[in-house]
Image: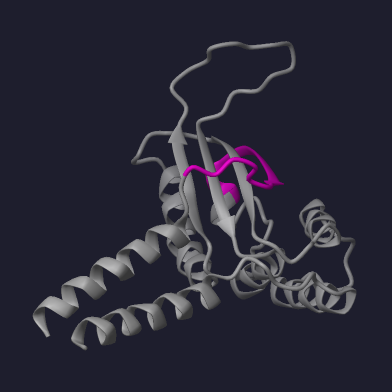
Amino acid sequence: MNYIISLAISAIFYLAFILWYGGKGKPLTEEETESLIQTIKKKSGIEGKEESDLLIGFRALAATDDGKEYLMVNLMKFKDTDPNSEAMRAHKRYSKRIVPLLFKRAGHPVFLSKVQGEFLKYDGSEEWDEVAIVRYRSRRDMLKMVAAAANENLGNEENDDKWISMKKTHVFPSRQSLRLGSVKLNFLLMMIIAGLILSLIV
């Protein structure tokens, strides 16, 4: 009986996690997108001004929404890679502010790597310092995160930590087509193991 109860508890935790982790929601409506964009504008003090490339990018991202999870690929070139430089301190401040908002919405990094040099370089190719791939539960969550983090320095190269640290960046959405591991499967295995352990000690 203890074994059954333990597995039932684990199953409840797993189902709760699946519901929170999501990844198969409804697409953004035009009204939702406009509301989120206006919130970002208001909090960053740019209402009534011409939309920046950043806001235009947000609109383009929302326009292709299918409600499902996606990956955002980030190619980054820093102004200075010295750990004690102002660029790196700004990068740490930005990460410290953004990461909790990301995790709150079931987003998380799936890959983070520092570039170690070049293997092949074609005409027009660019150099990068770091590559990060981040999982978002949906485009809705991504815009909500931006709206929550928005302030008067959004997009301001002189005052925003992101742009203080970055010399240039290339960011684009992608959809995973090959999956050798799964956060959901890992969590399920954790719940099964926790249930088995619980059944032994109760």
Q: 20 and 96: which one is in front?
A: 20
Q: In the shown orientation, is residue 5 left or right of residue 131? A: left
Q: 143 and 195: which one is in front?
A: 195
Q: In the shown orientation, is residue 155 left or right of residue 74? A: right
**Residue placed farthest to the left in the image?**
201
Q: 45 and 5: which one is in front?
A: 5
Q: Which residues are magenta?
A: 163-180
User: Residue 177 colored magenta?
Assistant: yes
Kindly identify the residue that appears in the image at 85 percent across and 74 percent down: 29
- Give the quadrant of residue 113: top left
Structure colour scheme: one colour
Q: 168 and 175: which one is in front?
A: 175
Kindly identify the residue that appears in the image at 38 percent across and 58 percent down: 186
Q: In the shown orientation, is residue 10 left or right of residue 1? A: right
Kindly identify the residue that appears in the image at 59 percent across and 40 percent down: 178
Q: Position of residue 151 (x, y in %)?
A: 63, 71
Q: Position of residue 67 (x, y in %)?
A: 74, 66
Kindly identify the residue that appears in the image at 46 percent across and 47 percent down: 181
Q: Position of residue 199 (x, y in %)?
A: 17, 79
Q: In the shown orientation, is residue 135 left or right of residue 14? A: right
User: Residue 144 colored magenta?
Assistant: no
Q: Is residue 201 above or below residue 86?
A: below
- Number of marks in picture: 0
- Give the quadrant of residue 26: bottom right
Q: Position of residue 202 (x, y in %)?
A: 12, 85
Quarter of the picture holding the N terminus? bottom left
